[in-house]
Every structure is written in structure tokens, then in C-alpha cells.
Image: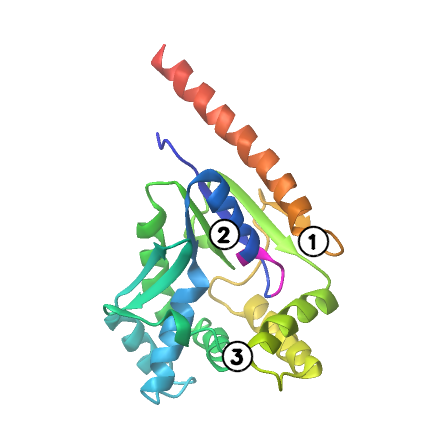
Amino acid sequence: MKNKLIIAIDGPVGSGKSTVARRVAEMLGYIHLDSGAMYRAVAWKALCEHIPLDSTEQLAALASSLRIDLEPRNGKQHVILDGEDITEWIGTPEVSHAASMVAVVPGVRHPLVSEQRRAGAQGGVVMEGRDIGTVVFPDADVKFFLTALPQERAQRRFIEERAVNTAANFEETFADMTERDQRDSSRTDSPLKIADDAVVIDSTGISIEQVLERMMTIVRERIAGTKQQAENSEQ
């Protein structure tokens, strides 16, 4: 039996899952793993090598050839691609858009899912993404699905983009988000959907602290239950 939990947090873009995943991990002393960073790493490499984003065979071959490690450093997740830290290069809107196209390719998803399972298998992780509770860890100890109204999610995304690009446009951000929602939900392999046993939290109009309070109440109950179960098995 694992001493620490596997916590899965899924949700669409702008739902707040990255923020709460980091905070939950900090509060528990767990590792935070952003599965989306792996897809952004593949997308960044594909753009660097001028691989067409509709070439499924080339993208699959690329994904299988890369080593991607997610390492916590000074409270922040760093993405290491073949030994090189590419964290600062994969947060652009261009890479994020490319990642959503790369992520629909089964030949890309399969090797990355295997890596995600390896990274979180021992527990003590808070992993975020779009298929963590349904595909990567269907037996995760605790599953959350975060969501919010599209207008609010787009506004959050726009604020993030505006911080790095003063020319960012809300209408373009909203359109891009809508397109990505459609792509994520309709892909044949590991589509974005709510796991049957996930706790759904709508963050529309509520603070991060309120979301965290709800989540941590559930997590602490599960930790207490797991501890009791372990004690009972030792008797």
C-alpha cells in the first residue's frame, strides 16, 4: 500500500487546475506534475525541427525519441528535454496552440502516458491534465474535475497571455480556447471528460482559496481513511 496518494486534477484550459495543483502539492509536500508540459515540450521540438503538425507519423516518431523529465526546482516545475531545461520556452501561445494539435495524435499520447504513469506510480503526486483520472491513473486515490464558465476561463487565459504579450486580444483568446475545448473533447484517443468518480468543482465566481478549501477537505478525509485502513491491516 502506498504511503502517499495519487491525486488527479483534470479540466479544460483556464479552469484553474494548474494553480490549485501547485498549491495542493505544496500543502501536502507532494510533487506537482503538469502532464500538459510534456505535450508542450513535444510541440516545441516539432516547431524547432519544422515538423508539420498534421504529420502524425513524424510526430509519433519524435515523441518516442525524446526523454522528458519534470523536475521540481525552487518551488517550480522545470521541463527537461533530453537534458536541456526548456521551461522558459514552452509557455508561449504559439507552443500552447501547437501542443493542443500534437496532443490529439495517439502515437504521441501513448509514450507520454507511459512516462506519466512511471512518474507518479509511487504516489505523493498531484498530477494535472485532461485525462489523468480517466486514462493515466483511472485508479487515482482522489480525482477532481475543475471547470468554469467559458467567458471566465477565457478571461483568465487572456490575463496570462497579456502578461507576456501586450498585443494579446481577448476575442482571439476566446476563439482559440473554444477551438481547443472542441479539439480536446472530440479527439478519439483520451478525450477530455469527467471521470465517473471525480469530484466536480465549478470555480466560476469563487476564489482559489475557496476551491482549495473544498479540495483539501476531501483529500484530508482520504488520507485519514487510508491511514486507518493501514492500521487495521497491521492488526
The magenta segment is 14-18
Magenta stretch containing residue 6, yes or no?
no
- Which of the two discs, 3 and 1, labels the residue nearer the N terminus? 3
Could you say where residue 137 lies in the image, as x and y percent from the top left? 43, 48
Above or below, 150 against 171 in this view is above
Could you say where residue 113 lies in the image, as x and y percent from the top left? 37, 59
Q: CA–CA distance between discs 2 and 3?
A: 21 Å
| Residue at the extreme top of the image, as rendered | 235
Which disc number belongs to residue 22? 2
* Res. 63 image quadrant: bottom left
Mark 2 residue type: Arg
Mark 1 residue element: loop
Could you say where residue 61 lies in the image, as x and y percent from the top left? 28, 76
Q: CA–CA distance between discs 1 and 2?
A: 16 Å
- Which of the two discs, 1 and 2, labels the residue nearer the N terminus? 2
Which disc number belongs to residue 168? none
For the point 68% across and 71% down, which residue is it? 154
Q: In which quarter of the image is the N terminus?
A: top left
Residue occupied by mark 3: 93
Residue 70 in view (yes/no): yes
Above or below, 24 against 109 in this view is above
Question: Magenta-highlighted stretch: main secondary structure?
Answer: loop
For the point 45% across and 54% down, which residue is it? 135
Q: Which of 164/129 is in front?
A: 164
Mark 3 residue element: helix
Q: Residues within 10 Å of mark 2 (few under 14, many from 20)?
A: many
Residue occupied by mark 1: 203
* Res. 36 image quadrant: bottom left
Image label count: 3
Query: Pointers 3 and 1 in contact (CB under 8 A)?
Result: no
